[in-house]
Image: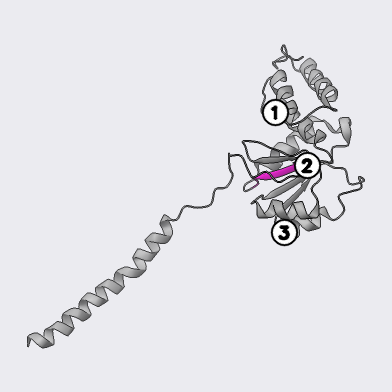
Amino acid sequence: MLNRAIPIISLIALSGLLGFLPEALADGEREKPSSPKNIDQTPPLVPIPNARVTKNGLLVGGQPSPDQLKAIEEAGYRTVITLRAESEPGDEGEQATVERLGMKFVSIPVPGPAGLTEANARSLAKALGEQDALPAVVHCKSGQRVSALLGLKAFVVDRVSAAAAMDLAKSLGLTKLEAALRERIAEICKADKSRNCEDLR
């Protein structure tokens, strides 16, 4: 009698264990952390021309080569933003390459000093604020327009002081467009007396 009871008890125990297994696996799946939608950390440095990385997930600089675009994708970047105008030579096929590699491509044409506008600064802020946009690459031909527009974005969108915006742009390598950015910020200051422009130098 006892011998016959043992298989029955074993079967009940096994059925109970199997009944818990799917739930345990499901619980394990629920405990896995979801991927971050955006990041707030320094991304890998890929050596594009005049490359710099920022603590908020940006690689900025000049025009990446096709091999560098592949390295950018392998480093985990999600978005490539170009500030080059469509008429500029030297970036042919970039959009197709970026999209083939599975990254998002964004074009915000900034044709020199004339392209340092509040509208372009807001467009850049919008592109960087998109879900899963970061880490991102922002480039032009040499990096000058990038540093200038990021400085303008800091002033227009993030509402830092005029001096802080200039300091940010210069920390990202701004030289040739420094006077143009300073002039653009001064124009905004003149039109908006509420802005902190006393320390603009």
Q: Report the magenta residues as a range.
A: 133-138
Q: Residues within 10 Å of mark 3 (few under 14, many from 20)?
A: some
Give SS at disc 2.
strand
Which of discs 1 and 2 lies nearer the camera? The answer is 2
| C-alpha distance separating marks 1 and 2 | 17 Å
Q: Find numbered disc 1 in the image and state the secondary structure of the residue it sits on.
A: helix
For the residue labelled by badge 3, is the local secondary structure a helix, a strand or a loop? loop
- Asked whether the beta carbons under mark 1 and mark 3 sit within 8 Å of each other, the answer is no
| Image coordinates for residue 165, horizontal then vertical, percent | 71, 24
Q: Which residue in the structure is indicated by mark 2?
A: 139
Local crowd size for mark 1, using a 10 Å CA cut-off: few (<14), some (14–19), many (≥20): many
Give the image quarter of residue 11.
Answer: bottom left
181 vs 172, nearest the viewer: 172
Cβ atoms at labels 1 and 2 below 8 Å apart: no
Q: Residue at x 83, y 38 (%)?
A: 142
- Which numbered marker is on residue 92? none
Task: Give how far apart the Cα atoms at labels 3 and 2 are.
Answer: 17 Å
Q: Residue at x 54, y 48 (%)?
A: 36
Q: From the viewer's perspective, is residue 155 above or below residue 78? A: above
Badge 1 is on which residue? 154
Residue that mark 3 sits on: 101
Q: Earlier in the sequence, mark 3 or mark 2?
A: 3
**Which quadrant of the structure image shows residue 181?**
top right
